[in-house]
Image (cartoon, grey):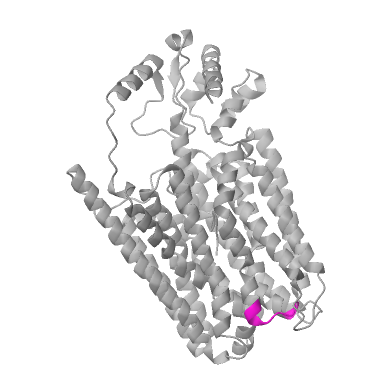
Amino acid sequence: MVPCIIRIQYKVKSLLIQEYIIMSQQYQYDDGGEAANNYLTPTPTYGYNPPDAQPLIPAQEVNNNSRNDSQSSLPKVKTFRQSWWRWLMLFFGCCFLLGSYFCYDNPGPIEKTMEEDLKISTVEFNLLYSVYSYPNTVLPIFGGIFLDAIGLRLGIMIFTVILTLGQAIFTTGGYYKSLGIMLGGRFVFGLGGESMSVAQSAIVSKWFKGKELAMALGLNISISRLGSVINGIVIPQIYNDEHTNLLGFALLIGFFVCIFSLICAFLLVLLDKKADYEEAKAAGTQGPSFATQKVLSEEDKFRWSDLKKFNRSFWAICVSCVLVYMAIFPFIQVASKQLQLRFGFTEIEAGQLFGIPYTISAATSPFLGFLIDRVGRRGLMIVASSVILFAAHVTNMFLPNCHPGDHCYSELGPLILVGIGYSIYAAALWGSIPYVVEAKTVGTAFGFCTAIQNAGMAIAPTIVGAIIDATHNDASHGYFWASFFWACICIVGTALNVWLYFEDINNNGGMLNKVHKFDAIQDLIASPSGKERRNIEANQDISEQTKQYMLHPGARDALKKSLARRSMAK
């Protein structure tokens, strides 16, 4: 299932957009001296203009307003969403996605027994993952629009019901041992899964702000990802080569987990409705209705017209995302069968080891996101993660095969490396998108990148299955050539990531390696050389009025003084 900070990938979209917009509004300069009387104080927008904000504000007016605001400030009163109730909401939010993550990987740990029991090939088995991604080549583009049309809370209930219905169909196919019914269930399951992630990010962002929002989303991802780990432990205990008649019952466990998620979704909706009622009552107004709450702001929504505004760095990120994820998830999806055929583990033992990459992701994703926010270096981390993944697949290629019962734990090395590479890549890549596009196009960028990533995830399992089926008679049971395929993808991905690193340095002001996007803008105005001047003029993230201000010699001097004092204050 697609990610971090994953399905990192799209799940953190709300956080990234909100933090980026807040950052773009918070810098107002005044030089506190002579220049402040002669020049305007800009509010840099970096592509985002708040509806009620003026692009340029007289410095004296800013100072007067600040003094008036401080004199008339009143003690803050906590709203309902700022009270202890938000922790109960966070609990429901964490449990809300457990069903999605638990059931997404239902097939993986029991692949070998399923293929023998249903008499299907690896290609046919991998279709259970491919069909999940088919609807999600479109839904990330239109899912937010649909949520806006029906309302956030109603959308949560609809998508959770769709998810549960899909798992019910999948379970029915398990009882009848019908691959066709199971594929239909997985398709319906996919209709709800990714959209639930978008809805969850949106509702969590209503209850948590700033650093608490980062913590809340990180905790949601970590706990939800544990669903995949638990699935690998529980399902093979029920359905294995000694109990081939229990496939339907094993999948029924997943259905009950989805029912639990549905109950949590219902309680989450009730709590959010109560919050609207309590806050509206405190304010003496009528709260927003059940069906009309907006999920995405205008800046967050997908617009086809935005595609032509994207630079080469963004397109490189999209292609890199497709390639690198093709070397991560298909590897995990077939890991259980490989552990049994090549390294001598039983199905139950393989299921327990199957979740190692997910465990690493769950444990490290929140900390990696925090670390990258503190040190930057996204470009370097993207390159490093693809190198780590390449090392994992090359190692997997040349590990010696073991006899049944030998328990060769050498395979833990590639599993751990994939988990580390996956965690770093997801945190760095999805956090890079706001740094290479305009703020008003961030929603389009996330939606499009997620859509084409799912397109890659739709075809990759089929390709891997075909390779394994064609070479399954060799000593490695086809996994040498599958690993060769993944290693080749990593080589192309690494080369592209290296190009992205230098493209960002040469033509994007080194945005990806900055701690904040503002730092890169600050570097651009550090000296009045022709190169920096051209970079300012070409930068699409700076409004035309701000460009004129930054390029004005006197204003530049005033801005330099303000930046110097800001650095000393830090």
Identity of the residue drawn at 38% across and 62% down? 92
Query: Does residue 555 belong to the magenta stretch?
Result: no
Q: Nearer the viewer, residue 380 or 564?
A: 564
Identity of the residue drawn at 39% across and 20% down? 57
Q: Is residue 106 left or right of residue 319?
A: left
Residue 411 picture location, percent across and down: 74, 69
Residue 549 picture location, percent across and down: 50, 19
Q: Is residue 147 above or below residue 58?
A: below
Residue 88 picture location, percent across and down: 35, 58
Whether residue 472 is visible: yes
Q: Is residue 389 left or right of residue 67?
A: right
Q: Is residue 316 above or below residue 52?
A: below
Q: Nearer the viewer, residue 156 or 410?
A: 410
Which region is colored magenta? Answer: 341-349
Q: How many discs appear? A: 0
Q: Nearer the viewer, residue 445 or 526?
A: 526
Q: Is residue 59 left or right of residue 408?
A: left
Identity of the residue drawn at 28% across and 45% down? 79
Q: Is residue 94 above or below residue 380?
A: below
Q: Is residue 434 above or below residue 34?
A: below
